Image (cartoon, coloured by chain):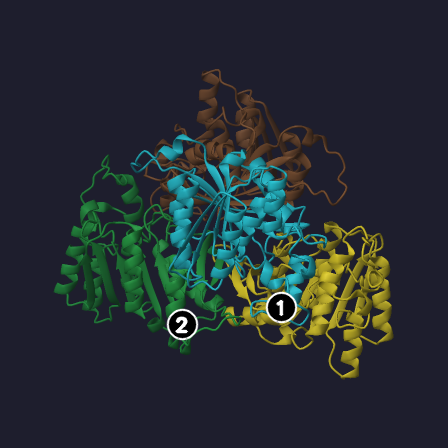
Chain colours: A green, B brown, C cyan, D yellow
Amino acid sequence: MANIRIEFFSNSLVRTVEIEMYIPNDLRTDIQIQHNPYYDRKCKTVFVLHGFTGFGRGWTNLYELAEKYNFALVFPSGENSFYLDSEATGGKYGTFIGSELIEYIRKTFGLCCAKEDTFISGLSMGGFGAIHTGLAYPDNFSKIVALSSALIIHGISVMKPGDDNGIANYYYYRKYFGDLEKLIDSDNNPETLVKKLIQQNKNIPKIYMACGTEDFLIKENRQFYDFLIKQKVDVEYIECGGGHDMAFWNEYFSKGFEWMA
Amino acid sequence: MANIRIEFFSNSLVRTVEIEMYIPNDLRTDIQIQHNPYYDRKCKTVFVLHGFTGFGRGWTNLYELAEKYNFALVFPSGENSFYLDSEATGGKYGTFIGSELIEYIRKTFGLCCAKEDTFISGLSMGGFGAIHTGLAYPDNFSKIVALSSALIIHGISVMKPGDDNGIANYYYYRKYFGDLEKLIDSDNNPETLVKKLIQQNKNIPKIYMACGTEDFLIKENRQFYDFLIKQKVDVEYIECGGGHDMAFWNEYFSKGFEWMA
Amino acid sequence: MANIRIEFFSNSLVRTVEIEMYIPNDLRTDIQIQHNPYYDRKCKTVFVLHGFTGFGRGWTNLYELAEKYNFALVFPSGENSFYLDSEATGGKYGTFIGSELIEYIRKTFGLCCAKEDTFISGLSMGGFGAIHTGLAYPDNFSKIVALSSALIIHGISVMKPGDDNGIANYYYYRKYFGDLEKLIDSDNNPETLVKKLIQQNKNIPKIYMACGTEDFLIKENRQFYDFLIKQKVDVEYIECGGGHDMAFWNEYFSKGFEWMA
Amino acid sequence: MANIRIEFFSNSLVRTVEIEMYIPNDLRTDIQIQHNPYYDRKCKTVFVLHGFTGFGRGWTNLYELAEKYNFALVFPSGENSFYLDSEATGGKYGTFIGSELIEYIRKTFGLCCAKEDTFISGLSMGGFGAIHTGLAYPDNFSKIVALSSALIIHGISVMKPGDDNGIANYYYYRKYFGDLEKLIDSDNNPETLVKKLIQQNKNIPKIYMACGTEDFLIKENRQFYDFLIKQKVDVEYIECGGGHDMAFWNEYFSKGFEWMA
């Protein structure tokens, strides 16, 4: 498994950033490897978005999945931005992931360019990011895997100056989500994006969601699933025992990757 | 020259960050090395702050200086923040550099803890950061080297929504500097910090400033120098032919490091 | 968990090398963490040696163990050397791990220096390396954890020019183990080291060995265990179903780390 | 300038290795950049081989050259091997650089594949490596830039067990160059490769050599130059004041890169 770290200048963020990638293209010839039909096609690309407080680094548990399904994995750093664009110069995280990075990766590496071969996934804040970025760039991604997603739009939309919800304060949310009073109707709300795509008769990427029943975000995940069902969006939703932790994510990345493959 | 990259969780930024360091503690025994008296004392520590659009990476030109003066260098990433604290959760870049990082480095590495052995330096946005952070944490740093410093407080304090000064827009400056109308009197203004330190009869770190006469920031540097002279602050100020570029910084890092040593 | 990569000049290998480390010293203050009594003592250090074809990189499964027991982990690169000294200039891998690296780490980081707080572990070629290096430097290490160890001395001692045992050829083994005809009695044989330590009345580090019954190295592990028992060395030996694979190593690193703690 | 580090499994070395690369493909849109005609063609690739005691890391001085000429730079680690193949399993450094790595880079990155667009360069041991690898793989490289090259074949061919030439001992040279008594006529001698290529009527890559007159390797460089002239090989040879140091290499990498471009 090739493990790659790239520092390059991002024009969306107006600074040099670093990302990590795994590419299963360094096959060993010293050991007998069973024929794997996934290697009869070209390598597909999966963006993997980390959660709040996280960082663009792979974890070795994903080696096996990347190798099994012949997926290149890309791990950008979201820097607690919820992967959204803000008005400030250098604050376009959504554009960075959904457009600039994908083009840079395609240009730099000999990887597939078709949206059919490009997926986006994430957990917690990264689950929100996978859903939001996938819906904002439906021509770039064909499948979304979102685990324990921080679908917090409705909750934070009522926050006022001075508020703090135990995770972050009002100023934090305003910094990344913009004017909270206008949030529900803005493009930062995945529901808004879904409605627009339906109105425009555009294809919506296929969505796989999973959330543990003990997760503090279970209510938010159920609500978004209900919304998608009402909108007749193609979604697979899994709910089962489990919390907001690595045990759950290891299990459901495994299932989500199988679903993508 | 040992070259070190550290990823660790920052409580000021509420996420994992990466910094680079150089430590000249891997002396070779296979070649004859001339006696260097700087190695008769313990290694001192110099924080080096990059400019706007930059990134926390050393550059190999500094190897020679670190080795010559027995300095450990620390290269944090400022992420276009001007190394300032903002109200939003996870936005405390000033606290990160001036307090958390310095404590973390001292705890993790066997380096000097005294402020006499700890310096801060930078170029452009990082020159501003060195001055501001040094003045905000005068018990942690004894010397400041600030090159081509982006001392832009007065210029941006009059910006309004919709403005863009060619480098960044109003929203960018408000994000990192706070309410621009209150900026002049705020602690984000190094002049305010100087006045407070004088009022409180506190020691002010020694300051070395340099700026090229063709630098677009020359006026700002002259003004701040004049301010310091009026306040009777101990400052060395160099002005000479040169622009806002690596040629100037290589030359004046060399001189600034000699001044620190 | 701080994740550190260091490049430094090794005088044993006469070139710059890179190692990785984990240090659990970046405690989060934003989340409630249960009191862990292992943090009432200083951090202990565990060297972790990879196997043949491997590389000095940590794997994220070890994060949890390092954090649980307050262990700093050090991952040197063995470069297929079996962690042994050879005659050639720059070929002293044993000296590198057992002496130079440990001193460099202690000098550079604020970690414990006592042998009681320093352990060595490894898998396959690294299991051999943990046993050999631990026995060669009994004043530096107090405990050894050796999984699926490549205790191949007897097997390769009879190889002749032109031979290849399916893993490597005669020239490979001669390059790292020296003259194979003299191997059994040489200090590259852990049995020789044990006998010498007993003769000299020196303390032998405590040893924990584990091997899967389906492992191709099971015979070699049983033989070495029998040898240790005959020599009355303090050894814990576990044998159970399992192969030469990550599933076994994850399970037994977990048990071995508990034994060390 | 994109800065890339790749860890991948090398089948020539039978283990995971790390290399660094620079690729000037992250053009900034926030600043006006003058038209550079080198960007009207595709990016070319230059392998850069470090010297004895070195390591596969770029140095920031080369940023400017890579950017100026639109060259991707590849920095493999030679691990004091003189970039030669040895008999031992996993000892094929020549095959690694000259064949495996070049194929891996071409496969992984969208870079030029033609030998006309692929160059090899190096300094000291890496100067030897550039010459030897370029001559051993003349279908992969069209130009060679060799600075202060360690063309030491004749000197070490007379070494005996117990000898040490101040840099390394007999066992070191035998380990990497093979049987020293047969060295002159072996394929590890660049002169042998030149003669064979002439005999086979094959194209020889163009060679640029430079050496300082105070360099301890000046005699060896003159001799090899004389040999090439006698063999009517297309070679540019520069000799001027200078030693075996970074000042010389910075100057002549600059000239050598211009020659390549």
Q: Which of the 4 quarters of the picture holds residue D235? A: bottom right
Q: In the shown orientation, is residue A136 left or right of residue A14?
A: left
Q: Given the current orientation, which residue lies at the most extreme left position?
A: A230
Of the 4 image quadrants, the one containing the N terminus of chain C is top left
Where's residue C162, x and y in %?
67, 72
Q: Which mark is residue C169?
A: 1
The answer to whether residue B119 is above or below residue D89 is: above
Q: Which of the 4 quarters of the picture holds residue B235? A: top right
SS category of the residue bearing label 2: loop
Where's residue D4, x and y in %?
53, 58
At label 2, the amino acid type is: Cys
Q: Which mark is residue B8?
A: none
Q: Given the current orientation, which residue lies at the most extreme front position?
A: C230
Instruction: Read off the chain for label 1.
Output: C
Q: Residues within 10 Å of mark 1 (few under 14, many from 20)?
A: many
Q: Residues within 10 Å of mark 2 (few under 14, many from 20)?
A: some
Q: In the shown orientation, is residue A77 left or right of residue A125?
A: right
Q: How many marks?
A: 2
Front residue of A144 and C157: C157
SS category of the residue bearing label 1: loop
At label 1, the amino acid type is: Asn
**Which residue carries the number 2 mark?**
A113
Front residue of C128 and D193: C128
Q: Can residue A110 be seen by looking at this rendering?
A: yes
Residue at (47, 37) in percent of width and height: C44
Mark 2 vs mark 1: in front: 1
Do residues under tags 2 and 1 come within 8 Å of each other at their CB atoms? no
- Marks 2 and 1, how far apart at CA: 43 Å
The answer to whether residue D35 is above or below residue D140 is: above
Q: Marks 2 and 1: same chain?
A: no
Instruction: Read off the chain for label 2.
Output: A
Residue at (27, 63) in percent of width and height: A135
